Amino acid sequence: MKFQATPYLTFNGNAKEALQYYKDIFDGEISDIQTFGEADFPTPPESDDLVMHGRFKKGNLTLMFSDAFQNQAITAGNNISLALELSSEEEIQTIYSRLSEKGTILMELQDTFWGAKFAKVKDAFNVIWDLNYTLPTTSK
């Protein structure tokens, strides 16, 4: 594990506005933004312009952003999770299993279209964790 948890903030359709807000406040940069419309899976047309994943950086500060998907209700407390980038398939499976044991699986551990294994788990203390392991790329 890289031993750094990154805050992941979720918004009610205004993630682009929030990204710009924090960019202006901290004088940082938006280094990555992808909409639901760009996803490699079907999404409702009304979600096409919403942010699926955005990243803000300023020095060592990294914040990740997303709009809520479809009818997901966002309230104070469930609008932030901690994202962990893990270093192996074994490590993500171990952390996923341990968090799931007394927690709630919000998204099963699975392969994703962005080339990673990913899972979302709410632990025994109601902390939400986004677990990601970027799969090695194969050269041809």
Image (cartoon, grey):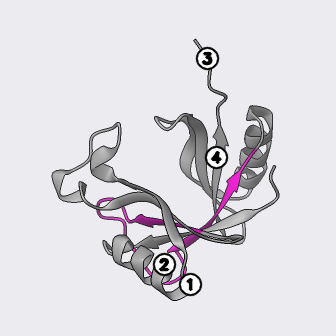
3D distance between C-alphas at marks 4 and 1: 26 Å
The residue where tag 4 is placed is: 132
Tag nearer the camera, 4 or 1: 1
Q: Which label belongs to residue 83?
A: none
Q: Earlier in the sequence, mark 4 or mark 3?
A: 4
Residue for point 55% across, 75% down: 28
Magenta stretch holds residue 66? yes
The residue where tag 3 is placed is: 139
Residue type pointed to by label 3: Ser
Packing grade of label 3 (10 A; few <14, some 14-19, many >=20) is few
Packing grade of label 2 (10 A; few <14, some 14-19, many >=20) is some
Q: Nearer the viewer, residue 76 or 20?
A: 20
Q: Are marks 2 and 4 in contact (CB under 8 Å)?
A: no
Q: Which residues are magenta?
A: 63-86
Direction from residue 16 to residue 60 in the image, left or right: right
Q: Position of residue 78 (x, y in %)?
A: 52, 74
Residue for point 46% across, 70% down: 10
Image quarter where the C terminus lies is top right
Packing grade of label 1 (10 A; few <14, some 14-19, many >=20) is few
Q: Which label belongs to residue 26?
A: 1
Q: Position of residue 16 (x, y in %)?
A: 35, 71
Q: Earlier in the sequence, mark 3 or mark 1?
A: 1
Q: Position of residue 45 (x, y in %)?
A: 17, 52
**Element under label 1?**
helix
Q: Quadrant of residue 38?
A: top left
The residue where tag 2 is placed is: 23
